[in-house]
Image (cartoon, rainbow, N blue to C red):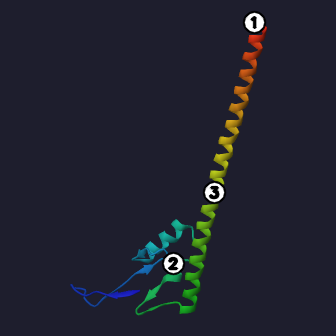
Amino acid sequence: MPLSRQTGATEGRKDVYYFSPDGKKHRSTKEVERYLQKEGITSLTVANFRYNGNKLIEDSTTRLAAVRRLKEEMETKKQRTKKEKERENTNEREEKETKKEKDKGWRRRRTENKEKEEDYNS
């Protein structure tokens, strides 16, 4: 999205900003590239975000398809992360339950041993 500068020595020049689907503003293709790498997005490259003069280099249908792919990929990543967290929580819960069962078994055996000792001593 090009924005014209309103004041200063460079008044009238245009600044280009790229907005990711999550609303973050990127001022350069380097920032876009870092964002794509950080988010693990492989379906898009910096070439999908080139700007030349008053228009994006790619035609609008290609850009729209690229944005859709980006959104889908980010949603998939969120879902994967959510599933991984659920799996971790389930594993933690199972481990706690297993530990409780072991503790119960240990307590039961300890009680049984005490009862045997009392029977033997009496």
Looking at the picture, which amino acid does disc 2 mark?
Answer: Val
Classify residue 68 by image quadrant: bottom right
- 31 left or right of 67 in image: left
At label 3, the amino acid type is Glu
Q: Secondary structure at mark 3?
A: helix
**Does residue 43 appear in this view?**
no
Q: Which mark is residue 121?
A: 1
Marks 1/2: CA distance?
83 Å
Residue 5 drawn at (x, y percent): 28, 86
Q: How many residues crowd around disc 3 within 10 Å: few (fewer than 14), some, or many (20 or more)?
A: few
Q: Earlier in the sequence, mark 3 or mark 2?
A: 2
Nearest to the observer: residue 81 or residue 44: 81
Specify which label sits upstream in the sequence, 1 or 2: 2
Image coordinates of residue 26 in percent, x first then y, are: 42, 75
What residue is drawn where x is 72% and y is 21%?
Answer: 111
Tell me, for residue 28, which label it has, or none: none
The reply to whether callout 3 and callout 2 are in contact (CB within 8 Å) is no
Q: Vertically, is 12 above or below 105?
A: below
- What amino acid is at disc 1? Asn
If the image is split into quadrants, where does the C terminus sit? top right
Q: Are marks 1 and 2 in contact (CB under 8 Å)?
A: no
Q: Which mark is residue 86?
A: 3
**Residue 17 locus on image (x, y percent):** 40, 81
